[in-house]
Image: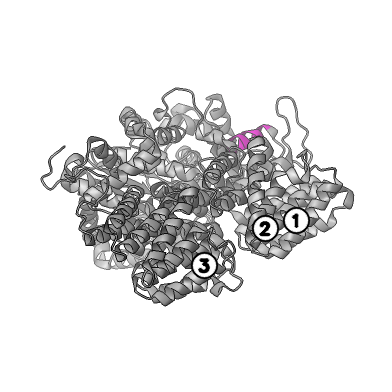
Amino acid sequence: MPGSSPPPDGNRALVGRAEVVRLLGAEAERAAGGEFRLVELTGDPGAGKTRLLGETAGAALRHGLTVLRGRGTEYENDVPLSLAVDALDDQVDRRAEQVRAALDAESARLLADVFPSLSDGGPGQGPAATGTGLNRYRLHRAVRLLLEALADPGGLAVLLDDVHWADEGSVELLSHLARHAPRGPILLAVTYRTRQAGPRLTAALADAAPGLRTRIQVAPLTLQEAGEFLGPSVGARRRRALYEASGGNPLYLEALARSAPAGATSAESAAPADADDGLLPGAVREALAAELAALPDGARLAAQAAATLGDEFEPGMVAVAAPTTEAEALAALDELVVRDVVRCAPAPGRFRFRHPVVRHLAYASSGAGWRVAAHARVAAALDERDAPTVTRARHIARSARFGDLLAVGVLVEAARATAYQSPATAAQWLRTALDLLPEKPGGTAEAPAPDRLSLLVELARLQGVGGRLVQGRDTALEVLRLLPPDAWAQRARAARFCAILERLLNRQAEGRALLRAELGRVPPEHQADAVPLHLQLIGDSLIRADYPAAAEQLDRLAAVLARSGGTAGGAGAAPDDWVPLVTLRLGHAYGSGDLDAARDLAGRAERLTEEATDAELAPWLESLSFLCWIDAMMGRLPQAVRMVERSLAIANATGQSYLSPWMLTAQAFTYGRTGRLAEAVDRAEDAVDAARLLGSDECVALALAVKSLLVRWTGDHPAALALADEAIRHAGGRREWWARLGVVGRGLALVGLDEVDTGGAEVLAACDAFVSPLLERSCLLVCCEAMADAEAERGRAGAAAGWADRAAAVPGGGTGSGHAVLARAHADQEADPAAAVGGAVRAAELFEATGERLYAARAWLRAGTAHARCGEKAAARTELARAAEVFGVCGALGLHARTVREQRRLGVRAGRTAARADGRLSRREAEVAELVRQGFSNQRIAERLFLSPRTVETHVAHVFAKLGVSSRAAVAGKLAGAGSPEGAGSPEGAGP
């Protein structure tokens, strides 16, 4: 909640934290100056983290930042994005109109499901309606944009306390914000207990760039500081005893100082020994327990009732939980306030415990049976108030009886309501519902019994997309165990899904063994039901480049389909016209080098998919992901774009978003080949985010490798190298084509950094020295062309010719391949420039025919330099001008700069781009530049300004060229320094 001053965190003066307070003030000042800052305050319970967060709030306010606060709570960590909602909801509600105006339509729609005040009240599908999905990375991005909007104009400080109790969705959001720092004056400060922070939280915070992150370990007080904390009324001997017992922890010092001398507490008054899970020293635990035990009966009952409710609570619900009258509850709360067990909360009429440890012990001090009854009373009261399902579910999960189908229904509803924002949280609700569900429930009209197997399948998918791959695999195995032995079709689908999760866990051998074992159990008359098992085995063989095994399995599947009368799982099509079979045959033909057959099969697959409905394609979506990739690899780019966009839509609509990282990476790969670099990098980043959420090293490695290759085009070779290195780490030495792609990215990035020999060796290794290479042919050809160009630029014609020879030996690498022809043109540049001209022009024609604009421009660049060597300056200028324009428009800044240098050698002085000669931004370019500064992608800029994405690409390229920058972050820096977007490209700072 926003505030004009930090709320009080106790009455004592702050002791022993002067250096930390100074550091926090410096971080607030840096944030107010326009930087994003991430501050972590970590330490043991009671170390003073919350108090220091209050000091952070004060420093932020002094620097003009709006302060928003939220906190995690121990028993309420099952509400998705609860930290963001707690911190931001009031401010979003207050500034809803302004925020909506600052957001693009998609972000506003996504956020409306989390912050209802952002809903425009019009028709439209909320994100929950799109099914469970890994595309929640879009929601995370929308929250980042929301923070940027809230930070305008004066800056923002978001202070999150006790994030060790954060829900899964909030941890994922923190990970996103750490990796994709919001732009603008934003301070994000978090506190957490060092020993209770799970690996996901610590990994999420560690993802931040080192320069943006400050971690402060809140240390214990010294003996001298402890004396100052306790005050002069505590003698030296007792002060030392308290210090030794507390370890210098302020909370422990205070608790022990409140208590009677050590040993005066009775065993009966102490909380159970395991009440704090070993976090508190025994003496401290006994002291706090004694404080609670000393309360009057009514006050102690109210404290126990309040502990069941939440971080903040109202008197009426305390009366419900106790149970007692509201007047008695108010009187008891008065007593608790006097004794400083609870304090008034910032919200009027609400209270909270003075410290989470006190609440924890109050909750633990009540009887287990009493807690069940209290939660049941609260759940019933919330039902009468028509409270949100998730709020009710939290209490139902702690109180429902086995076999209570109404409770099961609420939990299932809560799971489905939270599935989009946090599938891991939804999986917890569903698991609880299944634990309450009898094996053979007897449903009623009022509470129909859900199908246990259906819920288990739903749970496995939720666990999978929530990044709990092992749990999802185990649930899928549970489905297999529960299915009847003769439920062949259902068993095949369950085994296939289990094998998919095994693959994502890098356990491909176990997945294959499961598929083969299940297939071996299917009798001949039911082989048609086992088609999903065949398809998964074929796909696995293709990914491993085991083409003989894939051919054998394809023949076996075709025979199964033929015997079953030409149908597969209700497909109702002859084998030769069945989309999954045709697609996998295409993958085999292309991978094994039978390109004529591949072209025929690609045409047939295109026709069949266009004729099929989404519902017909949905069951076989994983097979279709091959089609997205192979179309792109074969240069069938328009078909690839259509197929991948359709496949992503089907995946999200049908809950198969565990496939989306592969598809998003294919989309990035395709956009890159068409020259849509900005969109391609955006999609690659989407793929990385989705893959991280899924928790699959394979998907992360592939997405990072493709992003590295795309970033290389922009000329940012250090960034490309870093991405490739991370991809290689995730690949873990695997011998599959996707693992090789990271090594390709590393090699080509090194070449871009002028380490040609080292880079060339890496590329050659990635291509397995062209002896049974795992990489597919188009990637091999790209490597050959890039290395031939690099060697030719060094004047090493022999080495360039060697790479051209390798390209010619790749299947399909003859005169019909633009890459092979261009590689030979590079090699001919020195000795036979006339031949280089002819080869480059021919390569450009081939690339233009397939829509590969950037490669066509590379060919024009080579044609230009070869013309110049022949003394044909006019022709050279023409070819170089064509290349420069495409590189500029696409954002290939390194190649654009290289082309400009060649133009200058020919006396051309105005070769920047098609931009205005005076270097100033036009009004439209200024609009685009400002949205780039705010973090909008090209696609979102297009939606906001009602332009085509291609037009936005052009404007962004012109902005880069005019401002003399090579990244979107640098645009923000230029605009901040210039004061006005329109004047940013002009030395005088004047508008057009």
Q: Going 57% across and 27% down the picture, which residue do you hit?
A: 383
- The residue lying furthest to the left in this view is 988
Mark 2 Cα shell of 10 Å, populated few (<14), some (14-19), many (≥20) = many
Q: Are marks 1 and 2 in contact (CB under 8 Å)?
A: yes
Does residue 926 appear in this view?
Answer: yes
Q: Nearer the viewer, residue 790 or 547?
A: 790
The answer to whether 172 appears left or right of 536 in the picture is: left
Q: Nearer the viewer, residue 457 or 387?
A: 457
Q: Are marks 3 and 1 in contact (CB under 8 Å)?
A: no
Secondary element at image label 1: helix
Q: Quadrant of the C terminus?
A: top left
Secondary element at image label 2: helix
> Which quadrant holds residue 229?
bottom left
Disc 1/disc 2 C-alpha distance (Å): 9 Å
The amino acid type found where label 2 is placed reads His
Which of pointers 3 and 2 lies earlier in the amino acid sequence?
Answer: 2
For the stretch drawn in magenta, the main secondary structure is helix
Disc 3/disc 1 C-alpha distance (Å): 30 Å
**Disc 2 target residue:** 588
The answer to whether 375 appears left or right of 986 in the picture is: right
510 falls in the magenta region: no
**Disc 1 target residue:** 554
Disc 3/disc 2 C-alpha distance (Å): 21 Å
412 falls in the magenta region: yes
**Disc 3 target residue:** 807
Q: Going 69% across and 60% down the picture, which residue do you hit?
A: 511
